[in-house]
Amino acid sequence: MKKLFNITLLVLLFLSFASCNQDKSAPRKARSAGGTSEILVVTQNSNQWDGMIGDSIRNYFMQAQYGLPQPEPIAKLAHVNVSGFSDMFKAHKCILEIVIDTTLEKAVAETAVDKWAAPQRYIKVSAPNRLAWVTLFEQQKEIYKQWFDEVERARIMSIFRPSVDNDVVNAIAEKFGFTLTVPQGFYIGKSEPDFMWIRKELERSSACILIYQTPYLDTVQFSANSLVAFRNRMLQQYVPGPSEGSYMTTETEFVPPLRTYITDFPTEYAVELRGMWKVENDFMGGPFVSYSFVNPNNGKLVTLEGYYYEPNQKKRDQMLQLESILYSMKFVEQQ
């Protein structure tokens, strides 16, 4: 885990350096295109896409997103050979280019921010042969995904930010000491001293944000068991189900919550919990994702959570929208 963290940190520092060194005097770029979580893979020839290189890309990016009731891949993939890589394709927001160059001594990854459009993330992985290419990809694939996720959140925020609901934002800031970019359509369904339930209710769906906190005492509070127990206590108390005696809780038997250390959250360190929620004594359920961190301004352990409900429909894109709202967290400056 420590080795992976070090690799992640080094690559992120490199990517941040590359981002900071873009020519700020350059003309404004065209708006990027592409579907939600769609990655355009550019190959030199079709054999690269059909062979071991394409297989390694598909095996990773087409794996099922954890915690969704219906199987959905973590990303969508589109493909074009470099001979057809026209200006139209160069406007895609997420581009992964493959280069096999036998004159190279080793595999290397190059990155660019807003190379042809904005927002955009471009990664070119070059290697002397297919095996070296796949080896480097396997070592860095999680970093590539993290970078592509960043541009997805930036695109979603560019849509949400102009329609922000200032009343909701200010209420969050007053109670918890930080803000979230919450667009119009959401409202505060419940507000307690250490809890807030922010809801968007449509005829067939519910998109909700939960914020809850407790005094931070020990690192054991970041364990999966402790986070789930904390979640269940708060939800049983504040989030009732549709029938008498029912309440929201966490599905732990069939889809155990997956706990992951996150290094790109606005707090720099956070623990992600991704899984399924259910309603005790009823038959409702759906996906959730949460981020837990310590608020340095009040010494409390804070959890930001997004959950979604829409029976028999795909939910990955809606969860990404909620995730983007959670990633918009900014501490209020102390006076």
Image: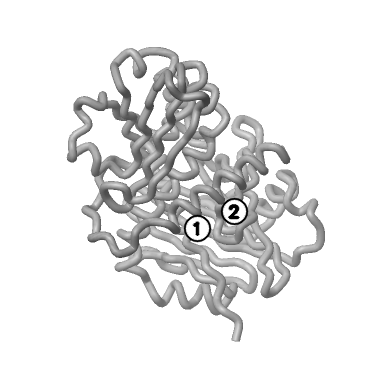
Where is residue 167, by image quadrant?
Answer: bottom left
Q: Position of residue 132 (x, y in %)?
A: 51, 20
Q: Tell me where residue 138 appears, x and y as whole percent.
A: 54, 26
Give the residue at x 50% y 70%: 179
Is residue 246 something that shows in the picture? Answer: no
Res. 191 mark? none
Secondary structure type for disc 2: strand
Residue 326's tag is 1
Establish if 89 lies above or below 64.
below
Element type where label 1 sits in the image: helix
As drawn, is 156 to the left or to the right of 29?
right
Query: Does residue 59 sit above or below 117 in this rendering?
Result: above
Q: Which residue is drawn at the image coordinates 38% and 50% (left, top)?
A: 113
Of the 4 image quadrants, the one containing the N terminus is top right
Quadrant where the image shows the C terminus: bottom right
Q: Amino acid at mark 2?
A: Tyr
Is 202 left, or right, of 210 in this rendering?
left
Which of 330/284 is in front? 330
Vertical relation: 283 (above or below) 195: above
Q: Residue furthest bottom?
A: 335
User: Residue at 18% across / 39% down in the picture?
Assistant: 88
Marks 2 & 1, CB-CB < 8 Å contact? yes
Residue 74 % position (x, y):
44, 34
What amino acid is found at the position of numbered circle 1 in the picture? Answer: Leu
User: As rendered, which of 110 and 168 lies closer to the eye?
Assistant: 110
Disc 2 designates what residue?
A: 291
Q: Who's the residue at 35% across and 65% down the image?
A: 161
235 relative position to 200: left or right: right
